[in-house]
Amino acid sequence: MGLAVSLYSTIDFEQSSQKLIINGCDEQFQNEQNLTYQAFVRGCHFLNQPVPNVKITIDNHVPVSRGLGSSAVCIVGGLMGANLWFDSPLNKKEILTLATEMEGHPDNVAPAILGNLNVSFTDSLENIQNVAFKVSSDLFFVALVPDYQLSTKKARQVLPKSMDYQTVSYQVGHAVALSKALETGDLQLIRQAIIDKMHEPFRSKLIPDYSAVKSICEKDGGVLYISGSGSTLMAIASNLNDAQKIIDETKKSFPNWKTHLLSVDTKGASGVLI
Ligand SMILES: Nc1ncnc2c1ncn2[C@@H]1O[C@H](COP(=O)(O)OP(=O)(O)OP(=O)(O)O)[C@@H](O)[C@H]1O
Ligand SMILES: N[C@@H](CCO)C(=O)O
């Protein structure tokens, strides 16, 4: 289950005289291993086209390894860049299949491509099944972004290898109810349905300020969850006043953190040929 929020990066792909130039990201990513470039190359290969010399310029607003889907942005951006380059032969469903193959699962690439709340899985025929839910516009999302990273790899290592039947049954019921509660905007139901036994008890230990921020959020009437695999903590509030209080209090306690008041994106990734 993944939610598309209004935090965007813009990536330009241009003809270049050199094989590859990358601007706008850390030096460690300015090479052929860059995930956006890797996805661009994957797209070209899939389309049976030669990989052109390219200059990639990234205007990035999605922080790396903070649970806000920066890897999904790179993968979706690279694939969409290749698709546009060759006059858009692929539709979004086909891009989703390629992106899932690269990311390993559809949960973050599906909302990045399609927008909204997306529940997705790989079916028995290896196709991606995807159900979109519109999220109530009465809800306000606040990303509270710590000044420390947490890689998805590390956040997966702390998860148990299996879940007992009782916990699975608890979690499935909660997940289904949460989808509906987000759709109707019922914050009281969200507060109950979002209680998680699958990853938060384990991953919260990797986020030293989790309990302090949860207290701030709940005192101000909101609901808190770990975004993606962390470290970002996402608050949901039912009005702008509560959302602003959560931002102000978090900034007071954690002046180095970034905060973003977000809405749900309903369109997903888009691109234009210039
Ligand atoms: N702007 C960027 N430029 C180059 N590579 C990037 C950029 N953003 C992300 N990446 C790649 O994605 C990796 C981060 O992926 P990771 O899955 O750890 O975090 P995330 O996608 O931000 O979190 P989550 O999957 O929980 O939402 C980086 O190590 C790098 O390989
Ligand atoms: N949903 C993934 C994070 C997104 O890659 C996880 O919880 O590990």
Image (cartoon, rainbow, N blue to C red):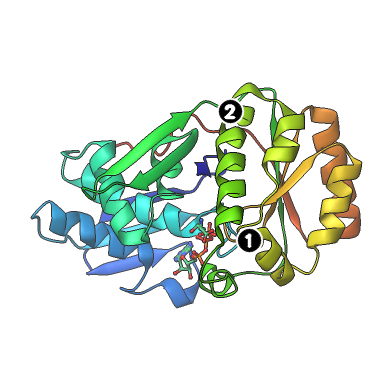
Residue at image mark 1: 230
Left or right position of 92 against 144: left
Say if disc 2 is inside 8 Å of ligand 2: no
Crowd around label 1: few <14 · some 14–19 · many ≥20 (10 Å): many
Amino acid at dot 1: Gly
Task: Categorize mark 2 by other alpha carbons within 10 Å: few (<14), some (14-19), many (20+).
Answer: some
Q: Is residue 255 visible?
A: no
Q: Position of residue 41 (x, y in %)?
A: 22, 62
Q: Are marks 2 and 1 in contact (CB under 8 Å)?
A: no
Per the image, the residue denoted by label 2 is 180
**Residue 139: % across, % down:** 69, 29
> Could you tell whether 249 is left or right of 50 in the image?
right
167 or 202: nearer the viewer: 167
Mark 1 vs ligand 1: CB below 8 Å:
yes
Q: How many marks?
A: 2
Front residue of 37 and 197: 197
Separation of residues labelled 2 and 1 (CA atoms): 24 Å
**Residue at point 72%, 31% (across, down):** 189
Lower position in the chain sequence, tag 2 or tag 1: 2
Q: Nearer the viewer, residue 12 or 78?
A: 78
Q: Amino acid at mark 2?
A: Lys
Question: In the picture, residue 165 is in which quadrant?
Answer: bottom right
Q: Secondary structure at mark 1?
A: loop
Q: Position of residue 236 (x, y in %)?
A: 73, 38
Residue at horizontal 52 percent and vertical 40 percent from the top = 4
Q: Residue furthest front?
A: 165
At 20% across and 63% down in the image, what residue appears? 53
Q: Is residue 159 visible?
A: yes
Towards the viewer: 259 or 152: 152
